[in-house]
Image: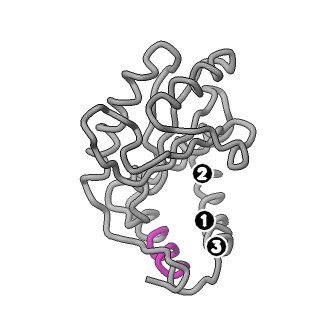
Amino acid sequence: MAELGIEIVQYDDRWSEEFHSIKRVLSIALKDVIIWIEHVGSTSIPGLGAKPVLDIDIVIESYDVFHSVILQLEQIGYFHQKEWSFEGREAFGRKNLLTPWDGKGTQWMAHHLYVCHKDSKELARHLAFRDYMRDNPQAVIEYEQIKRRLANTVTSRDSYTEGKTEFINRILRKGML
């Protein structure tokens, strides 16, 4: 692990299982106000080493329901993080390791939760990147090498993110054509 504290670990099939478990809880809590829930980011790409943190996008039809989404997510332990949100992607934090609260005291894997409008550019980017990577094993190898190199050499999280940007943008140009 680098001094930065970013650790890239081997892909783990349990990431998909954990996503589906969290998705079940979210689906029950939000059934009337969302369209679907997507597993995005590096942990959604089989074979790709990653930080063991899930990225989850909740998709809504309209911002008319967003206030209801906030209230329902608060009831299961999330809180809206306006400072981490931007157009097309609203971020939510977890009150504790038991979030989402399922009534069973489950301690969940670390995850980032976002709410995206169905037509948002950010959602389209997440899905295009994930889908391209799932279909291109050579790109998976290249991306993991970049991530491991950055995790071991950069001195800030911003540098880590910036170091991945060129690769991600290149994939998005291919995946969104």
Which of the 4 image quarters holds residue 162? bottom right
Mark earlier in primary sequence (3, 2): 3
**Between residues 170 and 18, which one lies in front from this camera angle?**
18
Q: Which residues are the magenta region?
A: 143-150
Pointer 3: what residue? 163
Q: Is residue 88 left or right of residue 35?
A: right
Q: Is residue 140 left or right of residue 61?
A: left
Which is more foreground, mark 3 or mark 2? Answer: 3
Dots 3, 2 in contact, CB < 8 A: no
Pointer 1: what residue? 167
Distance between the alpha carbons at the discs numbered 3 and 2: 19 Å
Q: Residue at x 31, y 49 (%)?
A: 107
Determine crowd level at label 1: few under 14, some 14-19, many 20+ residues with C-alpha closer than 10 A: some
Label 1: which secondary element: helix
Q: Percent position (x, y) of residue 10?
A: 31, 69
Distance between the alpha carbons at the discs numbered 1 and 3: 8 Å
Q: Residue at x 44, y 32 (%)?
A: 76
Label 2: which secondary element: helix
* Numbered badge on residue 35: none
Quadrant placement of the N terminus: bottom left
Q: Residue at x 49, y 46 (%)?
A: 95
